[in-house]
Image (spheres, rainbow, N blue to C red):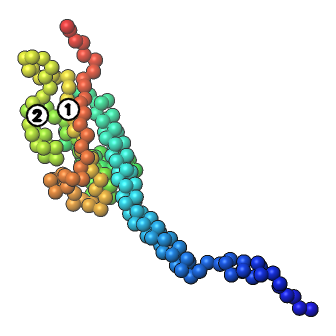
Amino acid sequence: MKLQIESPDFARSLKVAGFSLIEVTIAMAIAAVAVVTLLGMIPQGMNTMRDAGDEAIMARIHQQVLNELQVADFDALDTYDELEVYFDAQGEELGDNRGSGSQAKGTFEHIYSARVSVLAAGEKLPDSVGGAGFGGYSFDKGGSQSKLLRPVLIEIVAIAGLGNEFDWSDKYSHLIQTYQTTVVKMGQAFSS
């Protein structure tokens, strides 16, 4: 028994059912351009993600240091001047340059460093924020300096990979994130 196909429509439909070699080549070229473009965006996305993570951890470190300053005795704020605190990759404190904390500097690999500058009238600002003089705060026409406010600079830097060779010089100023705030002496009676 021999099967014969007599329908010309069936034979014609078999000829147009596939893709030509040119169509397949063009489709592959378009797909390759799309894949290469997407792969080129991966490094930029990774850098953006790393920078956002650093910013979030630095903000957390800033808040942690600021909270400690705000609960400290206002008259003893000078003891925090030039304090340098070291943190791990998650923003957890490891120690400081005065030997407090779980470990001393040089005995661990830290990722972030924070430096505190508590300014008094007549002092010079750190070089990382311009190095200008600070005249103090005045709220009256006579220009008398307020003894109830202290400006505080908290400088934070991600130093992963630099290790103990990092210093706070101009060489690394582009890495330093500076937060400026004021600590207020609370519980004071004001007369009008």
Direction from residue 124 to residue 45 in the image, left or right: right
The residue type indicated by label 1 comes to Pro
Residue 123 occupies quadrant: top left
68 vs 9: above or below: above
Quadrant of the snapshot with the C terminus: top left
Residue at horizontal 72 percent and vertical 80 percent from the top: 12
Label 1 vs 2, first from the N-terminus = 2
Image vertical order of residue 23 relative to residue 131, above or below:
below
Q: Residue at x 38, y 51 (%)?
A: 53
Q: Residue at x 53, y 73 (%)?
A: 27
Residue at figure coordinates x 26%, y 46% from the top left: 177
Q: Which mark is residue 110?
A: none
* Element type at mark 1: strand
Give whichever of 52, 135 is nearer the camera. 52
- Give the residue pinned by disc 1: 151
In this view of the protein, can residue 16 be seen by the observer?
A: yes
Quadrant location of the N terminus in the rendered image: bottom right
Label 2 crowding class (10 Å Cα cut-off): few <14, some 14-19, many 20+? some
Q: Is residue 95 left or right of residue 149?
A: right
Cα–Cα span, label 1 and label 2: 9 Å
> Residue 38 at what x, y percent from top left?
44, 65
Q: Amino acid at mark 2?
A: Phe
- The quadrant in which residue 109 appears is bottom left
Residue 116: image location, x then y, percent: 23, 41
Q: The residue tagged with tag 2: helix, strand or loop?
A: loop
Q: Which residue is mark 2?
A: 134
User: What is the x, y in percent for residue 111?
Assistant: 32, 55
Q: Where is residue 81, by image quadrant? A: top left
